[in-house]
Amino acid sequence: MVSAVFHSPREAHAASSATPSASRPAAANEAAMPAETATAKPKRAPYDWRGLALKVLPPVISIALLVGLWGLATMKGGGSFPTPAATFDAAVKLFSDPFYRNGPNDQGIGWNILNSLGRVGMGFGLAALVGIPLGFIIGRFEFANRMVSPLIALLKPVSPLAWLPIGLLAFKSANPAAIWTIFICSIWPMVVNTAVGVQRVPSDYLNVARVLKLSEWKVITRILLPSVLPYVLTGVRLSVGTAWLVIVAAEMLTGGVGIGFWVWDEWNNLNVAHIIIAIVVIGTVGLLLEWMLMALAKHFTFED
């Protein structure tokens, strides 16, 4: 066993003298290698065309089927429902000048979309200013949770349009009433999701904060906010979808310049092609808002 571990000085000298000679050919071979081989880049993996096809083809096929069924249903013509070709022609004409103005109640679809987005932004922004801090308070303090939770449970199921007459009575104007309706319908998802996120913060984090005697402000900014941010963004995403959903119905009732009023006005004119275009526009804008907030939530979601 000892001879397997220890070697005689003569054997050690022979091994040390043999090592450089054995390494010389390898070093010489490395020096003789061409520069192109030494700096060769690894081959790129082939592009996943199958994955791209699986992402693109299903929605394209579904839209094609929908348009095909629509075309078959309106093939004979003579009805009040327009064909896909007639609707496309109306869309081309409509979007050729989306920002025209022929008076206060006759404006292009671009102005209607911008006005609706402005109302949604105002109502949603006010809801975020109130709802997110309220959610932190409810989730952080048990007394506030017990005091506010019954009110939320009572008011959350109320239809958003039921708040519109209250807004008209309080503000005496259609535009603030629509903003009020957006505010009251979009505040609940932010309050609930923020409170749930605060309540799910691990108790070990808060125990460490107590040991370190951190102030409440540092607990909120250093511990709660990073942990609760994904929940807050989920509430924001749900609130934006609800706000954009409600603004169309609110504008139908209040009037003015907006995509909801534009749909109702086109119905009064029996212009069904424009109503179909408005439906597609409303869905597209809502989808874009959803994608933007999902990308933002994914950016701020920290996973191990």
Image (cartoon, rainbow, N blue to C red):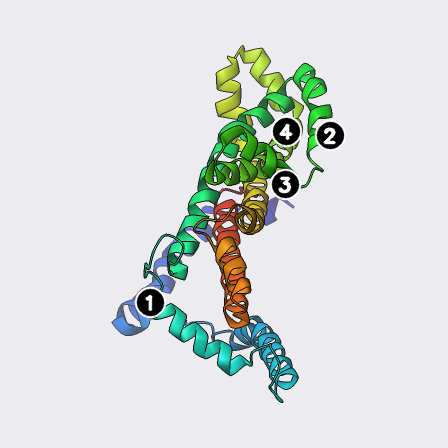
Amino acid tagged 2: Leu
- State the SS at label 2: helix
**Quarter where residue 183 is shown:** top right
Residue 51 x %, y %: 56, 72
Given residues 136 and 209, the one toward you in this image is: 136
Q: Which residue is mark 3?
A: 160
Residue 24 x %, y %: 32, 64
Amino acid tagged 1: Asp
Q: Residue furthest bottom?
A: 76
Q: Which residue is mark 4?
A: 195
- Cα–Cα gap, marks 4 and 3: 22 Å
Residue 215 x %, y %: 50, 12
Q: Is residue 61 left or right of residue 28?
A: right
Whether residues under marks 4 and 3 lie with C-beta atoms below 8 angstroms apart, the answer is: no
Dot label at residue 97: 1
Q: Residue at x 59, y 47 (%)?
A: 3
- The answer to whether residue 304 is seen in the rendering is no
Nearer to us: label 4 or label 3? 3
Amino acid tagged 4: Ala
- Cα–Cα gap, marks 1 and 2: 46 Å
Nearer to us: label 1 or label 2? 1
Q: Which residue is mark 2?
A: 154
Nearer to us: label 2 or label 4? 2
**In the image, residue 241 above or below residue 165:** below
Comes first in the chain, label 3 or label 2: 2
Residue 226 x %, y %: 52, 32
- State the SS at label 1: loop
- Cα–Cα gap, marks 1 and 4: 46 Å
